[in-house]
Amino acid sequence: MSGIDWSEASCASVGFGAADEWFPDKGGSNRQAKAICEGCPLRQECLDFALTEGLDHGIFGGLSVKERRALGAPRPRHERPINHGTEGGWKTHKRRGETPCSECVYATSEAKRVRDLRRAS
């Protein structure tokens, strides 16, 4: 993680064996992880890293995801893969501002042709 010597972090001496502390389930307790972060000499660097990377999980710099978002951290954008060769794939390409691939163009033209045939009958 970046050019920082993370071995100086308070959490490095504790270890990450208890992942539930650093990455608690929704509603789980994160008090112990936050207490470890409290006196950490790299707390700000850790928080900056989480904010820069847009991490949407875990305790970083003593703050939860919810608390980082309150600071204005952007929500990470999880792009779904394109289902090529479908009309939905064509729409995804367009929504992303991309030129649709030939498979998606063909699938969309076929779907339109079938709709037109159904309307005509």
Image: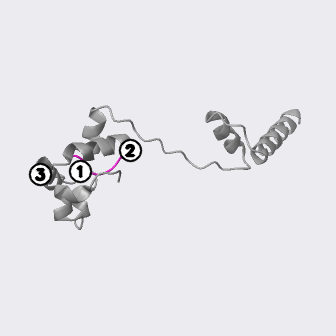
Q: With 89 as the anchor, is 35 left or right in this view?
A: left
Q: Marks 1 and 3, Cα distance to the nearest angstrom?
A: 17 Å
Instruction: Work out whether residue 26 can be spotted.
Output: yes
Name the residue: 22% across, 42% down: 44
Between circles 1 and 3, the one closer to the viewer is 3
* Image quadrant where one finds the N terminus: bottom left
Name the residue: 24% across, 39% down: 67
Q: With 18 as the anchor, is 69 left or right in this view?
A: right
Q: Is residue 56 magenta?
A: yes
Between circles 2 and 1, the one closer to the viewer is 2
Q: Which residues are magenta?
A: 54-61
- Amino acid type, residue under disc 3 in the picture: Ala
Q: Residue tagged by mark 2?
A: 53
In the image, which disc is placed on residue 27? 1
Residue 6 image point, x, y percent? 25, 56
Q: Residue furthest bottom?
A: 17
The dominant secondary structure in magenta is loop
